[in-house]
Amino acid sequence: MPYLQTQPDGSLLLSIYVQPRSHRNAIVGLHGDAVKMRLTAPPVDGKANKAVIAFWAKSLKIPKSAITMKSGLHNRMKKILLNSVQEKQIRDLVECHL
């Protein structure tokens, strides 16, 4: 899974490609080495970044504080750091949308 990397501290780094201003929030497949997701939020004032964190927190049933945006604050390509989650949870969530 090139979109997911295990870090030395046990956290997981997830690569995401975001398509903002969509009709619904959803994972829609892969985009290169990243998980492609659609968001209803616009890419202004950090709304899309907040929506990314909220989406993954809700989908994985973890607190928002367990997710950190590591890169891509102003880009469609983003990397988020996930704590308190198992690799299998993410893999199952992504693979059911492929």
Image: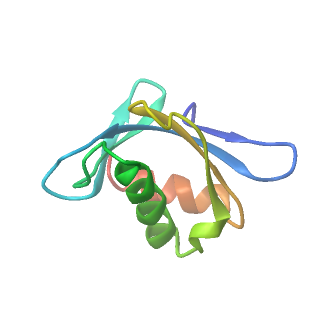
Say which residue appears at 48% left-offset and 59% top-offset.
Answer: 53
Q: In this view of the protein, which residue sits in the foreground, 36 or 73?
A: 73
31, above or below 65, in the image: above
| 8 left or right of 25 in image | right
Residue 4, by quadrant, is: top right
Q: Quadrant of the image for the N terminus?
A: top right
Residue at the far left in the pictured view: 23
Q: Quadrant of the C terminus?
A: top left
19 horizontally vs 61: left or right: left
Q: Residue at x 57, y 69 (%)?
A: 64
Could you say which is closer to the camera, residue 27 or residue 89? 27
Residue at image point 64% right, 68% down: 65
Depicted 11 relative to depicted 75: above or below: below
Residue at the far front: name it.
45
Q: In the image, is 33 to the left or to the right of 38?
A: right
Furthest residue toward top: 32
Residue 28's spot in the image, x, y percent?
Answer: 28, 46
Whole-percent x and y of residue 85? 67, 64
Q: Position of residue 79 (x, y in %)?
A: 56, 39
Question: In the image, 62: left or right of 39?
Answer: right
